[in-house]
Image: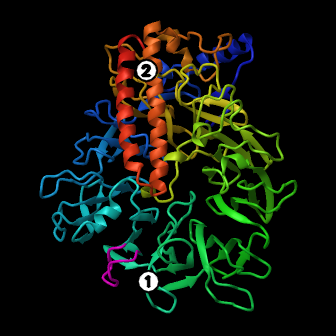
């Protein structure tokens, strides 16, 4: 049974039904192999689940950063995260220090991933960069410290570190700060993608990494076998003047094939460019070449969207007509046969591709044209959302003009198999399903104060607003999509699963046991909700990532969910089937809650309680004085989260106020932590 199943989030309609559910669940709990750890808030989690603390219990004043996304290994036994401040012997900067936590037999162990950052003047560099392979066995590091022969002290040095042996390999060393600045910071654009085993790395730099070009315009490189080779070689053998790829436009983009034999590039520094594929460092194939009789072979500007994992099929968009009868639209190119197929009619009015499935057979996009049955012409500053599969186009819905979502929803992701799609929008979605108001009873300005999450199922062509609630308390996000970082390549937090589960962050009360009025993590599937966070903490919780089967769901919270967690700072937790670790439940101190006090942790709602009434173990038990402190803490946390969101959007847009907003967010987070500590001291569970 997987997350989002009826056992995980069944909603009760009466007390008799609740007793029927809780009774068998309690009996079944005795059969769980991890029953000794199903205590505290884990007590009534379904499916033999239990919470585990992933980040260190003691972080020397640091905390798990909520503005930079978490990345989880496929098996769920390792997780990479960032923190303000340094701990776990990480010789890193006070901002964006990088870590990996690995699950052991009795606890999670954390390892710092950043290279030493003290340069020759003793000044601590502000933004190190460390991006890791999918299994976290290797890490790409930037440092001004010379750690190997050939490195340059106080220069720009890029290393690959073997996290098993601790040995490093020098990727590049250059005088000055150009290369370091490209790679530094969690949002650095130096790393584009890599093969599955990281034997090949696709890198972008203005510095010459291969010895074949001059420093200046950006070029793409394949770093393999200790050498950087130029990717942007044209079919005639000439080197392109500059090359790039869009930075993480969609998940599962596969800019480099999983075996590293194929990589894609567009000619030019920015925007659309002639699209090519470089294969086996030996030949270059034009992808966006016209196959019309009048201009066959002419390579036109295009935007790379995605390739299949083996690189054999490529999806891209172009403003030019490349096949007979096509116009600006979406194209699919077959590398083996050389066949190019226009997927949209000439008058499609394509605006943007939102998401694709991992194999590329499902494409979700926005357009102004009428491309499917029932679609209506959108007003100015609005678009239609469509699903494309097997040559068939389905109309999903239409955004509202008032929110200026003229490109479509800000957040979007498809499940790996493409049969499910989710997005965040501030618009009421008109469409073939009953209209879903984005923010009932609230002003929609500014949009970030009220965004809702929608889920779409291709088979039934059904669109559902999964975060809608009355009253709407504020901004909801598709899990983790707000915080995706360029340094992770095309990895997006797995917020949409093949079984239809959608993870979201919302302050809205979607289950009665959610009593804190703050941002919580939910899972939704087929109309059934379940809380991943508890719904009782005094601060916000955020989705981080999940395994593909949903057996492990990672999230960020400051609430103490195991005995070992004794500080008040945000941590990374995992809700895990058969979870629980001995060292996190040391003897001699009480769990975060006891007995019936943990019943707010069950996935079934507590029936018969008025919204906001007291629940054992929740904020309803706080004294009046403590409630006031808790509300102030919640308000400060919400303000900090909004500042984080504004800073992220400003950074993506290249606006100068991003750093100022970031500093304000840090200050607000500090105030929120202080208020949470006061709430704990006067009886709040936090």
Asked if residue 178 lies in the magenta stretch, the reply is: no
Question: What is the magenta segment's predominant secondary structure?
Answer: loop
Q: At numbered mark 1, what does the secondary structure look like: helix, strand or loop?
A: loop
Q: Is residue 370 left or right of residue 5?
A: right
Specify whether residue 212 is painted magenta: yes
Location of mark 2 (residue): 686
Q: On the rendered image, what quadrant is the N terminus found in?
A: top right
How far apart marks 2 and 1 lie (CA) works out to 56 Å
In depth, the one of 635 and 676 nearer the eye is 635
> Comparing marks 2 and 1, which lies closer to the viewer?
1
Q: Quadrant of residue 452?
A: top right
Residue 419 x %, y %: 71, 52
In-image side of 138 versus 424 (left or right): left
Q: Examine the rendering and report whether any part of residue 132 can be seen.
A: yes
Q: What is the number of the mark on residue 241? A: 1
Q: Nearer the viewer, residue 65 or 637?
A: 637
Magenta extent: 206-218
Quadrant position of the C terminus in the picture? top left
Which residue is at a point 79% across and 66% down the rendered structure image?
391
| Disc 2, SS | loop
- Mark before the other along the chain sequence, 2 or 1: 1
Q: Nearer the viewer, residue 299 or 523?
A: 299
């Amino acid at each position: 049974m997987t997350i989002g199943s009826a056992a995980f989030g069944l909603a009760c309609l009466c007390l008799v039904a609740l007793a029927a559910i809780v009774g068998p669940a309690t009996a079944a709990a005795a059969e769980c192999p991890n029953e000794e750890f199903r205590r505290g808030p884990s007590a009534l989690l379904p499916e033999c689940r239990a919470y585990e603390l992933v980040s260190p219990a003691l972080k020397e004043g640091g905390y798990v950063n909520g503005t930079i996304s978490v990345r989880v290994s496929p098996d769920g036994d390792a997780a990479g995260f960032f923190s303000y401040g340094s701990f776990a012997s990480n010789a890193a900067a006070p901002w964006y220090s990088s870590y990996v936590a690995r699950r052991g037999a009795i606890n999670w162990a954390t390892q710092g991933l950043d290279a030493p950052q003290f340069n020759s003047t003793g000044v601590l560099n502000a933004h190190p960069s460390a991006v890791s392979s999918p299994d976290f066995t290797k890490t790409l590091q930037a440092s001004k410290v010379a750690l190997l022969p050939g490195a340059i002290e106080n220069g720009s040095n890029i290393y690959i570190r073997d996290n098993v042996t601790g040995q490093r390999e020098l990727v590049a060393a250059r005088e000055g700060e150009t290369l370091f600045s490209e790679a530094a910071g969690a949002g650095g654009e130096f790393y584009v993608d890599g093969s599955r085993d990281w034997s090949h790395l696709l890198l972008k730099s203005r510095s010459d990494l291969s010895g074949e070009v001059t420093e200046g315009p950006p070029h793409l490189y394949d770093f393999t076998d200790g050498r950087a080779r130029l990717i942007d070689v044209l079919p005639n053998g000439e080197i392109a003047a500059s090359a790039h790829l869009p930075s993480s436009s969609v998940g599962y983009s596969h800019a480099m094939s999983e075996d590293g034999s194929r990589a894609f590039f567009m000619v030019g520094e920015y925007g659309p460019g002639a699209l090519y594929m470089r294969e086996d460092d030996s030949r270059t194939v034009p992808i966006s070449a016209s196959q019309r009789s009048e201009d066959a072979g002419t390579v036109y500007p295009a935007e790379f969207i995605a390739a299949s994992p083996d690189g054999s099929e490529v999806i891209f968009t172009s403003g030019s007509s490349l096949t007979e009868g096509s116009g600006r639209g979406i194209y699919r190119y077959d590398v083996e046969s050389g066949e190019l197929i226009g997927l949209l009619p000439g008058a499609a009015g394509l605006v943007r591709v939102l998401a694709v499935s991992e194999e590329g057979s499902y494409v979700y996009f926005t357009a102004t044209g009428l491309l499917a049955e029932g679609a209506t012409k959108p007003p100015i500053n609005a678009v239609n959302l469509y699903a494309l599969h097997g040559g068939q186009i389905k109309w999903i819905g239409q955004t509202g003009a008032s929110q200026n979502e003229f490109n479509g929803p800000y957040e979007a992701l498809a499940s790996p198999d493409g049969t499910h799609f989710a997005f965040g929008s501030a618009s009421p979605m008109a469409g073939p399903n009953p209209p879903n108001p984005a923010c009932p009873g609230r002003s929609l300005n500014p949009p970030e104060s009220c965004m809702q999450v929608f889920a779409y199922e291709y088979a039934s062509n059904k669109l559902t607003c999964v975060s809608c609630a009355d009253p709407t308390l504020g901004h909801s996000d598709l899990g983790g999509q707000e915080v995706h970082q360029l340094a992770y390549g095309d990895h997006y937090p797995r917020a949409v699963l093949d079984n239809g589960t959608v993870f979201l962050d919302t302050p809205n009360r979607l289950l009665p046991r959610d009593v804190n009025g703050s941002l919580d993590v939910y899972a939704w599937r087929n109309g059934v909700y379940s809380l991943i966070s508890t719904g009782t903490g005094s601060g916000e919780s955020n989705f981080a990532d999940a395994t593909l089967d949903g057996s492990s769901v990672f999230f960020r919270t400051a609430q103490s969910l195991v005995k070992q967690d004794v500080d008040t700072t945000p941590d990374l937790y995992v809700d895990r089937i058969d979870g629980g670790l001995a060292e996190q439940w040391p003897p001699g101190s009480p769990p975060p809650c006891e007995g019936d006090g943990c019943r707010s942790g069950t996935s079934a709602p507590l029936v018969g309680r008025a919204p906001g009434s007291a629940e054992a173990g929740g904020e309803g038990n706080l004294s009046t004085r403590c409630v006031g402190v808790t509300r102030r803490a919640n308000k400060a946390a919400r303000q900090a989260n909004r500042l984080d969101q504004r800073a992220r959007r400003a950074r993506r847009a290249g606006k100068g106020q991003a750093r100022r907003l970031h500093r304000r967010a840090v200050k607000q987070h500090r105030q929120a932590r202080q208020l949470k500590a006061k709430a704990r001291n006067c009886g709040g569970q936090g």
